[in-house]
């Protein structure tokens, strides 16, 4: 077990959470971060699906990395990712129909998520299956974390709800409080992510660029 | 010629040269973030060859065969998964359709949708635009995109001893399709309940058409006034309480889509609904001319 969690493997798992977060530092997967964060529930499921798919794709690519012809490696990676996403979506349709109805568009969007291509190309092509698996989990969770933070603020101030349960007391509305519809627009996700990047880099000077 | 490759651990940038660069040109990471890549530059496949016992992974033939094998494996895998799960998915889709129909009748959160559906829906007939019955059953199997003027499904339901008619509707929202079911009381005009859903409307704005808040606004409204489908969602003050509901602010295009859907789909059933109204006191003097005016009115509706 000690070997399974060597320093290098641990790093593969933990650095993407903060120090090398896929959204705020690698700046990958921004497009889907805009699309799915106006409510918490889709953000959570999206984060979960991406975590599972990026981990599985990382393992598969890592296993066959020495046989992949260099010149068509991107195509092979894309085929693996697309196949995985399709299978996950089919399984959801068969066993969790309600969830899949709610998320059909977002599941398909995972194929276009740059985190997958980025991690396959940068990590799984050079590392073993176990390290790649940890890297996939780490990046997926790092991505999910940002999504959930952004969705929390957008749903709270945009709709006054969390997971569709109203949290802002009626008394506040009676006093004239109005939900901020701007929070539901895609650009607000950009501003929120920018704020997160700002806070993160202000706290950790080593992340700042010149 | 470059001898080695270095890959940036942060962003995946690949640098070619004898040493790792001082900073990454993409993400500005320091040279300590670069790891050497074992594989040689694309031209020289010889370093990899000993490992593979003579197979040159960089040759064109290898790439073509490799791609073909991968594609065939994936194709069989997907075909297998898809055909293995197809019956379950179809069943889910049928159950979901039943749930949607029940939801328009204010029957929500059903556990056994099939049993509930069979006890409520007495008949799924097919009618034509003139209001005549074409088939006594099979309306359920008419796909929403197969609905035409001669092929109109109608669900005759019984809730609390009263007869209700459920009319399926389909239309276009802002980003994709919208659809719904309209449950009409036996008087052929008053709305009992409605169900709306959508494929991909904006969450928080257009997607709100599926919320109870919006759907409940339709309860008790009238569909037809003066022989036309008058039911619509409008902005601001309602000029006619009986047939208008408030639309959703910020979702103008989706609400326009809902209005177009109501006009088009309910318009097809005008003759059927008018026939249900007649036994009642003749509140509507224009009922008669409605039937004659139907094709024209539909043409107008589609234009809008």
Image (spheres, helix red, strand yellow):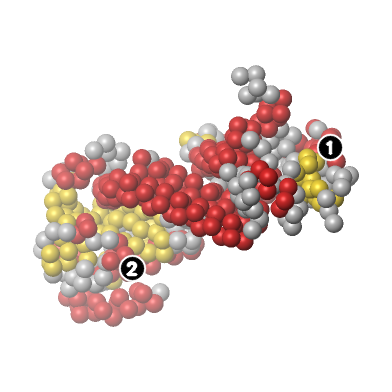
Task: Name the foreground residue: B210 vs B13.
Answer: B13
State which tag comes first along the sequence, 1 or 2. 1
Discs 1/2, front = 1
In the image, B82: left or right of B288? Answer: right
Q: Which residue is mark 1?
A: B32
For numbered disc 2, what is the local secondary structure? helix
Residue A20: quadrant of the picture:
top right
Residue shown at 84%/34% (left/top)?
A205
- Above or below for B229 versus B15: below
Residue shown at 79%/48% (left/top)?
B5
Task: Name the foreground residue: A109 vs A67.
Answer: A67
Q: Which residue is mark 2?
A: B263
Q: Quadrant of the N terminus of chain B?
A: bottom right
Q: Which mark is residue B111?
A: none
Give residue B229's position: percent from left, percent from top. 30, 68
Residue B287 appearing in the image: no
In the image, B181: left or right of B3? Answer: left
Residue B62 appearing in the image: yes
């Amino acid at each position: 077990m000690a070997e399974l969690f060597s320093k290098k493997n641990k790093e593969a798992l933990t650095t993407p959470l903060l120090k090398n977060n896929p959204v705020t530092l690698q700046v990958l997967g921004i497009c889907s971060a805009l699309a799915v964060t106006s409510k918490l529930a889709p953000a959570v499921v999206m984060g979960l699906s991406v975590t599972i798919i990026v981990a599985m794709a990382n393992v598969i690519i890592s296993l066959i990395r020495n046989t992949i012809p260099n010149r068509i490696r991107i195509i092979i990676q894309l085929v693996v990712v697309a196949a995985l996403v399709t299978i996950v979506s089919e399984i959801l349709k068969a066993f969790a129909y309600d969830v899949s109805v709610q998320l059909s568009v977002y599941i398909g969007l995972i194929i276009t998520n740059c985190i997958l291509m980025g991690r396959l190309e940068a990590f799984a092509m050079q590392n073993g299956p176990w390290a790649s698996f940890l890297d996939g989990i780490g990046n997926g969770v790092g991505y999910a974390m940002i999504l959930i933070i952004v969705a929390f603020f957008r749903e709270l101030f945009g709709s006054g709800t969390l997971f569709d349960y109203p949290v802002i007391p009626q008394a506040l509305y009676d006093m004239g409080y109005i939900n901020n519809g701007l929070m539901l627009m895609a650009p607000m996700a950009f501003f929120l992510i920018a704020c997160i990047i700002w806070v993160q880099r202000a706290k950790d000077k080593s992340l700042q660029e010149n | 010629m470059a001898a080695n490759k270095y890959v940036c651990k942060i962003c995946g940038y690949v640098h070619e040269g004898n040493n790792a660069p001082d900073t990454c040109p993409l993400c500005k990471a320091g040279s300590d973030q670069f790891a050497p890549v074992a594989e040689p530059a694309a031209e020289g496949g010889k370093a990899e060859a000993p490992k593979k016992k003579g197979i040159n992974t960089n040759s064109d033939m290898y790439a073509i065969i490799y791609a073909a094998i991968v594609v065939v494996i994936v194709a069989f895998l997907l075909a297998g998964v898809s055909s293995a799960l197809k019956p379950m998915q179809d069943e889910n889709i049928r159950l979901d359709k039943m749930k949607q129909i029940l939801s328009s009748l204010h029957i929500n959160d059903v556990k056994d949708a099939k049993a509930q559906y069979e006890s409520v829906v007495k008949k799924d007939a097919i009618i034509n635009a003139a209001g005549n019955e074409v088939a006594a059953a099979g309306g359920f199997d008419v796909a929403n995109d197969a609905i035409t003027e001669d092929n109109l499904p109608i669900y005759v339901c019984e809730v609390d001893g009263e007869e209700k008619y459920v009319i399926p509707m389909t239309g276009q929202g802002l980003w994709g399709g919208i659809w719904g079911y309209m449950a009409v009381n036996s008087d052929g005009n008053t709305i009992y309940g409605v169900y709306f859903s959508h494929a991909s409307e904006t969450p928080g704005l257009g997607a709100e058409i599926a919320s109870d808040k919006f759907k409940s606004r339709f309860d008790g409204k009238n569909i037809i006034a003066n022989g036309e489908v008058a039911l619509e969602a409008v902005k601001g003050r309602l000029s006619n309480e009986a047939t208008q509901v408030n639309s959703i602010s910020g979702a103008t295009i989706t609400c326009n889509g809902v209005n177009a859907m109501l006009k088009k789909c309910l318009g097809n059933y005008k003759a059927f609904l008018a026939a249900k109204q007649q036994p009642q006191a003749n509140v509507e003097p224009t009922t008669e001319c409605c039937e004659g005016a139907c094709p024209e009115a539909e043409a107008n509706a589609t234009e809008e």
